[in-house]
Amino acid sequence: MKTPFTRNAVISWLFFFGLGLGTFFFLRHINKGPKIDGIPASLRQGLERNEQISRKLPVQRVLEFPKSAAVLKPRANGKYGLKTALDSASFRMQVVNPTSGDTLSFTTDQLKALPKTEVVFDFKCIEGWNQITWWAGLRFSDFIRKFYPHLLNPDGTLKYAHVGLMTPDKQYYVGIDAESMMHPQTLLCYEMSGQPLPLNQGYPLRLIIPVKYGIKHLKRIGYLYFSKEKPKDFWAERGYDYDAGH
Ligand SMILES: Nc1nc2c(c(=O)[nH]1)N[C@H]1C(S)=C(S)[C@@H](COP(=O)(O)O)O[C@H]1N2
Ligand SMILES: [Mo]
């Protein structure tokens, strides 16, 4: 009769016990080491290596859907930078010109004069939910071509590697690679589901950048700037992936 304690069974148990113990000490070792922006340095380096690889590939277009597929009232998520009262009459998007240092202020009416572009796509939050939503605004690339053509290379790419955005109170801020910002699906957005943006979803102006996770879709754009270095980023400082593309 066979017992559960055959030689092979014992070897297997010891093998898996050793593997578990090894994993435990390996993870403990990683966790005790130096941290970069909230996570172990080796994990951060892993994220950065992924980012270097994805930077070498062109940013793809995300799939678009018919408007009928969009939810009517998309869920609102994240209030950082929206807690300060909004004075809509004095609202401006302030853009710093990196060559002259001058700041230009844009009203939403000035921006609405540019061609209106719509996108219906699957909005994904890193918390694990997603929904098909419908947005309208102007392409960021159209904005640059109209107001900042001197910031473009002859091939149409931006001369600066990154764009930074901040809420008017500077409590929420993101940094985005220039290629994703100049992507044709990236909008300075003023409408959701065919209506003006609700206050908690970024009225009067927010970023919609379908090639990135929700964390990068900054609501209530107060400041926009161009940078050679990575701009500071609220969630990257708290342990998340800086790139947040998908
Ligand atoms: N100003 C600001 N913008 C923000 C956030 C925030 O906390 N503050 N949260 C982000 C996150 S995590 C997500 S998922 C989306 C959610 O957009 P929604 O409220 O329109 O669903 O907004 C992003 N933009
Ligand atoms: Mo999110």
Image (tube, rainbow, N blue to C red):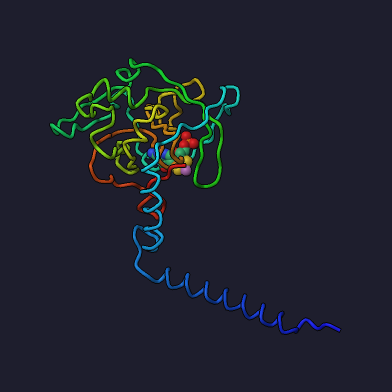
Is residue 144 or residue 224 the one in the foreground?
144
Q: Is residue 67 visible?
A: yes
Residue drawn 42% across and 33% down? 209
Measured as percent of width and height from the top left, residue 37 is found at 35, 57
Is residue 136 or residue 63 the one in the foreground?
63
Residue drawn 47% across and 42% down? 246
Point out the image quarter for the N terminus: bottom right
Q: Is residue 78 visible?
A: no
Residue at the far right in the pictured view: 1
Residue drawn 29% across and 41% down? 170
Q: Is residue 122 shown above or below 53?
A: above
Measured as percent of width and height from the top left, residue 178 is found at 31, 36
Q: Is residue 3 left or right of residue 199?
A: right
How many numbered circles are shown?
0
Measured as percent of width and height from the top left, residue 197 is found at 44, 26
Q: In terms of image quadrants, where is residue 130? A: top right
Measured as percent of width and height from the top left, residue 177 is found at 33, 40
Residue at the far left in the pictured view: 100
Q: In terms of image quadrants, where is residue 160? A: top left
Q: Is residue 16 left or right of residue 37?
A: right
Residue drawn 27% across and 34% down? 224
Is residue 243 or residue 110 the one in the foreground?
243
Q: Is residue 66 shown above or below 24?
A: above
